[in-house]
Amino acid sequence: MPKEGEITSLLRDTRLGNRAAWDRLAEIAYPELRRIAETHFRAERPGHLLQPTALVNEVWLKFMKLNAVQFNDRVHFFSLCSRLMRRILVDYARTRPARESALHALSATGRIEETALDLDRALNVLEQAQPRAAQVVELRYFGGMSIEEIARHLEISPATVKRDWLAARAWLYSQLHEVSP
């Protein structure tokens, strides 16, 4: 388990081009990245051709290619990784027939099966209207972060995070029902 602040320190070192920092970061961040990928896959259809390990590897390769990405801290790093995982899964879904790629979205009554593209469109609309609420969804649902972690990251109260989470979830539920009656 990494020491408190170790990931943030390694992220700072990677900005300086320290290859050993990238290697150490890969080693200690992998379990959390894998957990985030597994969270994304909980919502994917069974038998998906991509697997969590492949998704983590693809994210890592993209960051290594970019090498210009600057992460503020551990939470920012994992948040961007989760967002990139979502992008990869959406891009993958675009190359497959929509009926083959189902994604479950949270709702007040459980999960509703929708396509990855429908959920992505709804999240993009939410992001335009309510950026903070969309960020809460990304961090909570896709990133698996707690209310308290999100509150610290966004520098808002846990009560505000809960309100954003509930409102965003209800709004997404209504949008996804309109997309696919």
Image: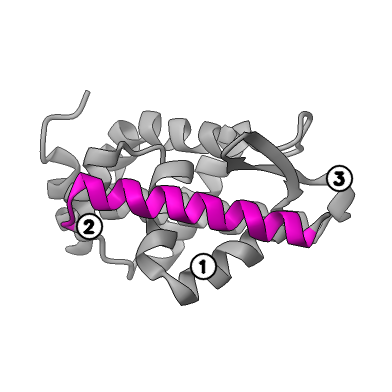
In the rendered structure, find residue 154 and report the number of the disc placed on it: 2
Name the one closer to the observer, 171 or 121.
171
Lower sequence index among marks 1 and 3? 3
At label 2, the amino acid type is Leu
The residue under the point 27% across, 47% down is: 150
Q: In this view, does 11 lie above or below 111?
A: below
Name the one closer to the observer, 97 or 106.
106
Lower sequence index among marks 2 and 1? 1
Which of pointers 2 and 1 indicates the residue nearer the eye? 1
* Residues at marks 3 and 2 touching, judged by CB atoms closer than 8 Å: no
Q: Residues within 10 Å of mark 3 (few under 14, many from 20)?
A: few
Which of pointers 1 and 3 indicates the residue nearer the eye? 1
The N terminus: image quadrant:
top left
Under circle 3, the secondary element is helix
- Residue 174, quarter of picture: bottom right
At label 1, the amino acid type is Leu
Specify the color scheme: one colour
- Which range of residues does the magenta coloring cover? 155-179
The residue under the point 42% across, 70% down is: 130
Residue pointed to by mark 1: 126
Residue pointed to by mark 3: 100
Q: Position of residue 37 (x, y in %)?
A: 52, 37
Q: Is residue 43 visible?
A: yes
How far is mark 1 from mark 3, CA to CA? 25 Å
How far is mark 2 from mark 1, CA to CA? 17 Å
Q: Where is residue 122 in the image (x, y as percent from the top left)?
A: 62, 64
Which of pointers 3 and 2 indicates the residue nearer the eye? 2
